[in-house]
Image (cartoon, grey):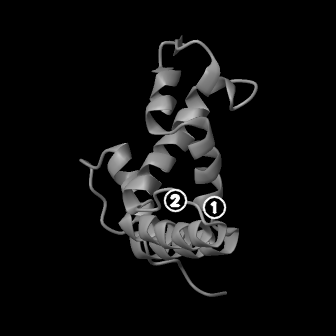
Amino acid sequence: MFGKFTQVPGPKNPDVNLSPLQALRLFVNDTLATRFSNSAAKVSSQNQWTDETSVHAFWKYFAAVLGHGIVQYAEERQAYVAEKSSVAGLLSNSFLRDLHTFEEWQHAKQLFAMSHIDLSAHFNQRASDLLNPAQ
């Protein structure tokens, strides 16, 4: 009806040397970090918090999100109060403690929240820049 799909689906500029982390950074990039940082500054101002809202603070938050996925406890607070130990040999809960106190983590989750619509817009734009869609 519309003819053959003429583009090869996948990366527009494939790079066989691209590591998984480099591929992730194509989507979760400094532009996104800046958007989160600007949004966090507004939330911090509205709540009269003194938490750091810089791009660096966003990357700390992002690392903690990944860390909480690896260091799993029944309750988040346990990662900050439980005996420091290695979990399954992958990551110690001291990793999370080095990033935030429990109270800082609670604020960070509020500071660096962004609407699903804004996140979808960013990832859709990055996908259109980097990828040819499948038919």
Element assignment for label 1: loop
Q: Which residue is mark 1?
A: 113
Q: Residues within 10 Å of mark 2 (few under 14, many from 20)?
A: few
Report whether 31 appears left or right of 113.
Answer: left
Q: Are marks 1 and 2 in contact (CB under 8 Å)?
A: no
Q: Residues within 10 Å of mark 1 (few under 14, many from 20)?
A: few
The quarter of the picture where the C terminus appears is bottom right
Q: In the image, what residue occupies the spot 49% across and 73% down?
A: 38
In the depicted view, which residue is nearer to us: 20 or 117? 117
The x and y percentages for residue 108 are 58, 52
Q: In the image, what residue occupies the spot 67% across and 74% down?
A: 117
Label 2 amino acid?
A: Thr
Q: Which residue is mark 2?
A: 50
Label 1 amino acid?
A: Ala
Q: CA distance from mark 1 to mark 2?
A: 17 Å
- Give the mark nearest the N terminus, 1 or 2: 2
Q: Is residue 31 visible?
A: yes
The x and y percentages for residue 88 are 54, 13
In the depicted view, which residue is nearer to us: 56 or 124? 56
Element assignment for label 2: loop
Q: In the image, what residue occupies the spot 59% across and 34% down?
A: 68
Of the two numbered discs 1 and 2 in the rendering, the one whose residue sits closer to the viewer: 2
On screen, residue 21 above or below 32: above
The x and y percentages for residue 125 are 50, 76
Q: In the image, what residue occupies the spot 37% across and 65% down?
A: 30
Q: Quadrant of residue 25?
A: bottom left
